[in-house]
Amino acid sequence: MARRKQIYEGKAKILFEGPEPGTIIQYFKDDATAFNNKKHAVLEGKGVLNNRISEFIMVGLERIGVATHFIKRLNMREQLVRQLEIIPLEVVVRNVAAGSLSKRLGLEDGAALPRSIIEFYYKDDKLGDPLVSEEHITAFNWASPQEIDDMMALGLRINDYLAGLFAGVGIKLVDFKVEFGRQYEGDMMRLLLADEISPDSCRLWDMETNDIMDKDRFRKDLGNVTDAYREVARRLGVLRENENTGAQGPVLVSDNGDNASI
Ligand code: UDP
């Protein structure tokens, strides 16, 4: 069998050419990175969990009428998705102050926001994904005013869906990041939700204890990262009890060559 052609390797995923034109295979790696790649680890089983969690969320969003790139999950680590022209923006929706918002505006982590806030970041690793305004987006032609409106409306719909979904299993949705892409069909173009939605791209806090159940466990060296992801999957009903996600207990592999169990 011919080897599949790799299109792109990102920090947490690899994209391969799909079986038909217009399709792509998205492979979920176990790698975790933070602080613009300065911190890196391999968290055994993370890719399997994110594949399943993202599938579950994309299928749920399709059900309420949000168009996504997701076609089907192929196996433990791969899903078939539609090939899109990715808009080079990260769309962040926030319900509670945390992360870069707290830092930038001097807010206390956990403070409720007066309303959900949407932000755009320009996807450029070299620049560290800077925050940009609608002025920048339209002036540099990254997206049209109509696309900005559509991304904001979709971001809020996704937020409503996710906030309800997670609240139902005792998890507070603090914030999350999504990406969108354009699909062309003849003269028509539509925006689809792309990439993934998983604990790598959301802030998720246990409603009772405020325990962190997302990638901040990795960023802040809190340990038990995949255990937290597995708990998110378990609460969502994504994993059958005792299902093996390939993890024997996660091992932190630091860049200086030391291995430490976490
Ligand atoms: N986020 C992401 N990818 C990024 C940057 C942020 O998925 O490259 C997510 C992050 O996990 C959080 C939300 O977007 O759920 C808001 O992140 P924030 O701007 O606070 O940045 P951070 O604190 O991660 O630097």
Image (spheres, rainbow, N blue to C red):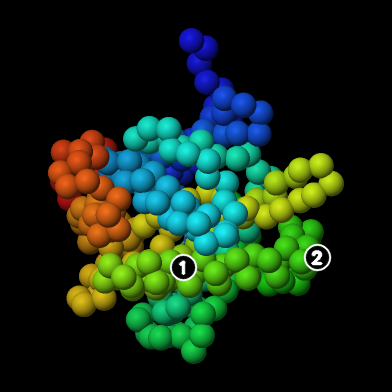
Rate crowding at label 2 as few (under 14), some (14 to 19) or many (20 or more) other CA atoms within 10 Å: few
Mark found first going from the N terminus, 2 or 1: 2
Label 2 sits on a secondary structure element that is: helix
Q: Which residue is mark 2?
A: 139
Three-letter amino acid code at the position of disc 1: Tyr
Q: Quadrant of residue 225?
A: bottom left
The residue shown at (26%, 76%) is: 207
Query: Where residue 51 appears, x then y in whole percent?
Result: 39, 44
Q: Which residue is mark 1?
A: 161
Label 1 sits on a secondary structure element that is: helix
Q: Quadrant of residue 78?
A: top left
Rate crowding at label 1 as few (under 14), some (14 to 19) or many (20 or more) other CA atoms within 10 Å: some
Q: Is residue 184 left or right of residue 229?
A: right
The foreground one among 46 and 154 is 154
The residue shown at (23%, 36%) is: 246
The answer to whether 78 is drawn above or below residue 143 in the figure is: above
Quote the CA–CA distance across marks 2 and 1: 32 Å
Q: What residue occupies the far right of the structure in this picture?
A: 187
